[in-house]
Each structure stands twice: as structure tokens, then as C-alpha cells.
Amino acid sequence: MKGIFSALLVPFDEEGKVKEKGLREIVRQNIDVQKVDGLYVNGSSGENFMLSLEQKKFIFKTVKEEAKSDVKLIAQVGSINLDEAVELGQYATELGYDSLSAVTPFYYPFGFEEIKTYYETIIEKTNNNMIIYAIPALTGVAISTAQFEELFENEKVIGVKFTDSNLFLLERLRNKFPDKLIYSGFDEMLIYGAISGVDGAIGSTYNVNGQRAKQIFELCQQDKVSEAYEIQHVTNDLIEKVLELGIYQTLKEILKVKGIDAGTTKQPMKAFDESKQEEVVKLVEQFQL
């Protein structure tokens, strides 16, 4: 379960329906071209929180059918509706996903005991492994080292997707829990996670830039940090431009330039600004995507 995982993009048509052929093509692009070690399915990059239960199940099923056992698969099942999270967790477990993941419950100011119960319930009902998805900037939920220790007491909680800029907390977690999996969640900060000894990374830009991510990660493991920094600089040049144009829209347009039916984003996200198409073509050429 170590290495580089793409937070899988999902293609939609103009009516908001999943494009099955395009989804399969994106899966193969990640496995065959980017050579990622795994896929993180139905996370933020998959526009998950705008999808129906049936759409989420369809994505889980299609990805498993296409990926088979070629790479490790993590199913993000988190939802503010615990019943839905459990149902999705049971479904993904039956399909053979290697682990579940769940974003912390959000919107309402849940206390830690409520958050702990949320995770314990999903684990109990699915009997699958769990990776905590910590992304405080979007959920408003910050988990302390002591609280992580409580969560990690459950042997089924095998790790955390750490999408946080708190590098002190990252260092404390790595030092205190050497046997738990820690995944870096910010693509632009991969090198800092790799230096800190994370076990891997999960990110959206790896759908098109996974090979560079793997180079950064592997070079840091070989103590070739200066070489890794050079690749991170190039990567961040790309990320900076992608963010300027709109992250999910632009990543899908990059895939389209490569001949993949990556569709559009799901409303209320706006569609890609077609007047910027030439800029995307230049990105593909400049960064050899």
C-alpha cells in the first residue's frame, strides 16, 4: 500500500452522467502511462461530494473492473450521511478494494468522540481497513496527535491521507506512529512529505504528472534531495498554471489533448474556458505530459 496513488479524475457529460468509456481510459492512463502504484477512488478529485449514491457505486465498480489487480485500490466512502458511508464501504469491500478511506464528517461542528464513532462504525460494518482522510482546510476538522493516537488504537485504522500544511504535525505523526501509513496529500508539497518519511502520496495531478511524482518520491528515498527538488520545481511550475486555469477542468483538458475522453466537470462547477485551449496544448508540450 506504499507509493504514488492518483486521486482519480472522473469524466462527466454535459448532463452530469459518468462517461464509462472515458473513466476506463483514465484508469488505464494512470496505470499504463503514469505507472502509479494505486488509485484513490471517489475522493475530491472525482467530484465525489456532488454525486448520487448510485453514481459512486458505478464508479467503484467500473474502476475495479478496469484496474483488476494491476494496482492497489483505495475507496473513499466518507459522507456526512453515515448510513451512506457504511453502504458504500460494504459495496467497495465486496468488490475487493484493498482499503477504505473516509473524510472526516464536516459542516456540523462534530466533536472528536462523534468523529471517532463515525470511523469505528464504518470499520465495524465493513470489516475493512480504514485510512483517515484529514483535510482541515476544507472540513474545518483538525485532529491532534493525541486524537490520532486514539484513532490508531483500532488496528483497522492503518493510516492517514495527510492533506495539511502543518509539517510539524506531520513530523510528530511520523515519529510517533512508524507502523502506520502516512500519505502526503498536497502535490505541491510532495518533497516535504517525502523528506519527512511518508509512505506515499495521493494527488490529483498524478493523473497527468505521476511519473514526476514517482521520481521525487524515489529520489528522496535515495537521499538525493537536491535532484528531487529540481523535479519538484518543474512540477510546481505545472501546478501553478493548472491552478490558474482551474484544477479539475484543466487536468481533464490535458487528458483530452492526449486523446482521452475526459469529459467535463459536474455542475455547479463551471466548465473549462475554451478560449484557454491553446494554453493547455502548450502545457502538454512544455511539460511533456
Image (tube, rainbow, N blue to C red):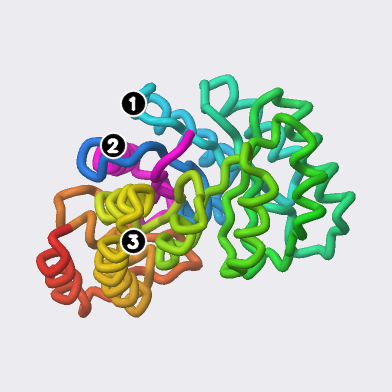
Say few, some or many: other residues with alpha carbon within 10 Å of mark 1 (under 14 / 14 to 19 / 20 or more): few
Q: Amino acid at mark 2?
A: Ile
- Mark 2 element type: helix
Residue 42, percent from left and from top: 51, 45
Task: Judge from the rendering whether residue 17 lies leftward or rightward of residue 145; answer left or right.
Answer: left
Q: Which residues are magenta?
A: 1-30
Can see residue 263? no
| Figure quadrant of the C terminus | bottom left
- Mark 3 element type: helix
**Label 1 belongs to which residue?**
70
Residue 243, percent from left and from top: 37, 74
Along the polypeptide, which appears first: circle 2 or circle 3? 2
Residue 130, percent from left and from top: 65, 36
Along the polypeptide, which appears first: circle 2 or circle 1? 2
The relative height of residue 170 versus residue 273 in the rendered view (above or below) is above
The residue sitting at 36% across, 54% down in the picture is 220
Which residue is the extreme one toward the front? Answer: 223
**Label 3 belongs to which residue?**
225
Inter-mark Cα distance, 1 to 3? 30 Å
Inter-mark Cα distance, 2 to 3? 26 Å
The residue sitting at 57% across, 50% down in the picture is 161
The relative height of residue 137 versus residue 76 in the rendered view (above or below) is below
Q: Quadrant of residue 163?
A: bottom right
The residue sitting at 46% across, 33% down in the picture is 73
Whether tag 1 and tag 3 are in contact, CB under 8 A, the answer is no
In the drawing, what numbered circle is on residue 31? Answer: 2
The residue sitting at 22% across, 60% down in the picture is 254
Can see residue 143? yes
Q: Amino acid at mark 3?
A: Val
Residue in the foreground of this view, choosing between 220 and 8 = 220
Residue in the foreground of this view, choosing between 49 and 156 = 156
Which residue is the extreme one toward the left? Answer: 285
